[in-house]
Amino acid sequence: MKARRIGYARVSTKDQTLERQIKLLIEAGVSKDNIYLEKVTGRTLNRTKWKELLADLIVGDTLIVTELDRLGRNKKDILATFELLEAKGVYVEILNMPLLNTNNENEFVRELLQPTALNLLAYFAQKEIELKKERQTGAYAALPVDEKGRKLSIKKNKVVGRPNKQENLSQEQKRYIEAWIAGNIKTKDCIKATGIGKSTLFVIKKNIIGGGV
């Protein structure tokens, strides 16, 4: 059976597009049918398509990604991925770092340069991820707030982040919560009736009565 070229493309949020990565993978000789696509942060372990890809890879396949950090969320993960793929007999190609390609026929590059380069580049990839997170945190902290203290997008002037559950309660949910606060129904019955978790209920209660529990 002819060795397969299989691609993996990932972005961190649903708002981001995979088109650039798909284009680069196709240009590298990967069939569109052989590209696994995922929209999930690299920090989570719940990468469904990545797990499916690893299960699908067999000896002689080549895994192609556009950038090193597609293979893991930190240096440890990246190095572990390389070891796992090597153990499975799978080659790796990093489109923007061809020095790391494990199907390199140059023995000097493969045995002497690659291990050092991989450690260094995995380290820098991890640092870039950390810096990106710091920039995102700083940018979020700098956003203006409305009269309710909610962060607003500068471009769209809309509330960003997760919606405030207390502000989006239905009238029926409010009635159950009021009855619960008044002691007329039990906590478990309020949770069942409203679909709101226990911790969130107590936060709402604290906000409503000004600090009491």
Image (tube, rainbow, N blue to C red):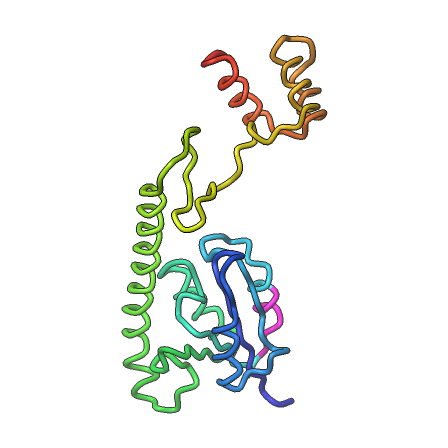
Q: Is residue 178 left or right of residue 39?
A: right
In this rendering, the answer to whether 13 lies above or below 96 is above
Q: Position of residue 179 (x, y in %)?
A: 67, 13
Dominant secondary structure, magenta: helix
Q: Is residue 145 magenta?
A: no
Q: Is residue 153 left or right of residue 89?
A: left
* Magenta-tinted stretch: 52-58
Residue at x 35%, y 61% (from the top left corner):
75
Q: Position of residue 159 (x, y in %)?
A: 47, 41
Residue at x 64%, y 18% (from the top left corner):
177
Q: Position of residue 127 (x, y in %)?
A: 29, 59
Specify the quadrant that holds the N terminus.
bottom right
Q: Is residue 99 left or right of residue 92?
A: left
Q: Position of residue 66 (x, y in %)?
A: 44, 74
Q: Out of 40 and 23, give the one closest to the viewer.
A: 23
Residue at x 50%, y 85% (from the top left corner):
27
Q: Out of 97 and 10, give the one closest to the viewer.
A: 10
Number of marks in picture: 0
In this rendering, the answer to whether 208 lies above or below 4 is above
Q: Out of 132 and 62, give the one closest to the viewer.
A: 132
